[in-house]
């Protein structure tokens, strides 16, 4: 009898052990991993993206983020990038996004300000921010992104802020004071071009691939193409020997855009993963670009004879006065522009108030 009881107890223990092991063994779908938020039924997408950049600049800026999107979505969202003009002319990208002829795009915010006036502010305001961190705060936490998304949605487009950057100025003749800009013919755009015009320059728009020739043949006297890093990649230091500091614009944006129909087909998990991948990837890319900035400027000086001309505090004050005139002109173009510029001025006031008052322990808002 005792033997039968012991045998039955052993069998029962064995069965319970087997059931426990089976219960602990997870069942993973083909598109999931233990830490993923991607749903097991998530569809697979193979998307095409056209950017305004090409070659090494496209890979440096966007390549790591696209690979991160694929990784974070467990391979369910794969994006093939194409350089500017490969699939279509850059001026047609917004319309193609609207109609669905293009799945995704990357371009400088404000490029289509003729359709979305408030986007011009994202192209960069001279003296708008003291650094890129302020630009991030204003975009993500002060309502500007909400307004941008509202306006792009009218075009059947979803926007994700991608890369904040500086816009500087390289010229043939030195710019040591604001008056030196008078009479120069420059290539620029957005608020930067309005600021240069306010200082007496004339401004033209020339496509990136044509800029080196335009500079070397004397068609234009200077150029704004991001900051020292991107301008170094474009080899402008071979024909331009002066770089002006500080960069007038800190906080212009290159952004990512999705056709809204494509965006709505993503599962909630895919959308969350894409947003996180873009945020993380772009921050890493921004830091990489800032590192390249310093190295590029050093190389311009040491290896190409470029002179760095830093405006005095008095000249910077003149630059800020000209910049505020530009802000007001942009505000007058559209009611939403006026709202964002008003928010920006309040943002500046908060910053100044914080600097003028000794912070309490733990108060590090600025």
Image (cartoon, rainbow, N blue to C red):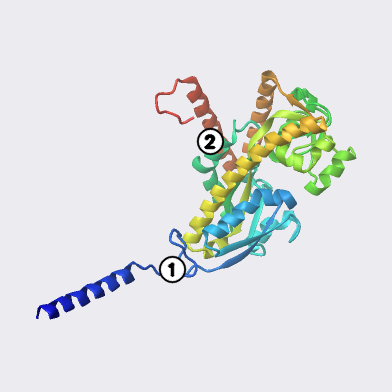
In x, y percent, where is residue 225? 74, 40
Distance of label 2 from label 1 (alpha carbons): 48 Å
Q: Residue at x 64, y 59 (%)?
A: 97
Tell me the mark number nearer the camera, choosing from 2 and 1. 1
In x, y percent, where is residue 194? 72, 35
Name above or below for residue 173 compared with residue 1: above
The disc, 2 or 1, on the residue closer to the chain's N-terminal end is 1
Q: Residue furthest front?
A: 3
Dot 2 and dot 1 residues touching (CB under 8 Å) = no
Whether residue 26 can be seen here: yes
Task: State the count of labels.
Answer: 2
Q: Helix, strand or loop at disc 1? A: loop
Name above or below for residue 73 compared with residue 202: below
Q: Helix, strand or loop at disc 2? A: helix
Name above or below for residue 201 compared with residue 225: above
User: Depth check: 79 or 327 in front?
Assistant: 79
User: Depth check: 340 or 212 in front?
Assistant: 212
Q: Residue furthest right?
A: 217
Mark 1 Cα within 10 Å, few/some/many (few <14, many 20+)?
A: few
Q: Quadrant of residue 77?
A: bottom right
Mark carried by residue 28 = 1
Mark carried by residue 111 = none
Q: Report whether 24 appears left or right of 46.
A: left
Q: Residue at x 73, y 50 (%)?
A: 56
Mark 2 Cα within 10 Å, few/some/many (few <14, many 20+)?
A: some
Whether residue 54 can be seen here: no
Q: Residue at x 77, y 23 (%)?
A: 179
Q: Which residue is mark 2?
A: 343
Q: Residue furthest top?
A: 314
Identify the image quadrant of the N terminus. Answer: bottom left
In x, y percent, where is residue 151? 58, 51
User: Depth check: 139 or 326 in front?
Assistant: 139
């Amino acid at each position: 009898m005792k033997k039968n009881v012991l045998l039955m107890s052993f069998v029962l223990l064995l069965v319970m052990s087997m059931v426990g092991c089976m219960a602990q063994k997870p069942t993973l779908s083909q598109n999931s991993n233990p830490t993923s938020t991607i749903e097991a039924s998530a569809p697979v997408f193979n998307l095409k993206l056209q950017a305004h950049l090409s070659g090494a600049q496209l890979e440096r800026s966007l390549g790591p983020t696209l690979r991160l999107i694929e990784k974070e979505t467990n391979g369910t969202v794969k994006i093939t990038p194409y350089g500017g003009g490969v699939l279509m002319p850059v001026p047609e990208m917004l319309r193609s996004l609207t109609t669905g002829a293009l799945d995704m795009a990357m371009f400088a915010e404000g490029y289509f300000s003729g359709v979305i006036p408030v986007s011009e502010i994202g192209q960069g305001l001279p003296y708008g921010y003291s650094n890129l961190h302020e630009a991030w705060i204003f975009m993500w936490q002060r309502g500007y992104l909400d307004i941008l998304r509202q306006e792009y949605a009218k075009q059947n487009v979803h926007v994700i802020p991608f890369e904040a950057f500086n816009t500087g100025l390289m010229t043939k003749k030195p710019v040591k004071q604001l008056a030196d800009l008078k009479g120069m013919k420059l290539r620029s755009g957005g608020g930067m071009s309005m600021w240069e015009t306010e200082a007496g320059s004339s401004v033209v728009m020339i496509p990136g691939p044509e800029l080196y020739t335009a500079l070397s043949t004397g068609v234009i006297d200077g150029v704004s193409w991001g900051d020292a890093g991107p301008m170094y990649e474009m080899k402008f230091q071979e024909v331009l020997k002066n770089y002006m500091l500080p960069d007038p614009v800190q906080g212009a944006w290159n952004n990512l855009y999705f056709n809204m129909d494509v965006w709505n087909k993503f599962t909630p998990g895919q959308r969350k993963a894409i947003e996180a991948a873009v945020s993380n990837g772009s921050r890493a890319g921004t830091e990489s670009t800032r590192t390249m900035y310093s190295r590029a400027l050093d190389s311009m000086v040491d290896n190409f004879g470029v002179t760095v001309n830093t405006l005095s505090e008095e000249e910077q004050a003149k630059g800020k006065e000209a910049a505020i005139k530009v802000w007001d002109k942009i505000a007058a173009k559209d009611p939403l522009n006026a709202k964002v510029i008003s928010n920006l001025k309040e943002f500046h006031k908060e910053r100044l108030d914080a600097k003028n008052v000794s912070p309490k322990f733990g108060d590090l808002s600025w």
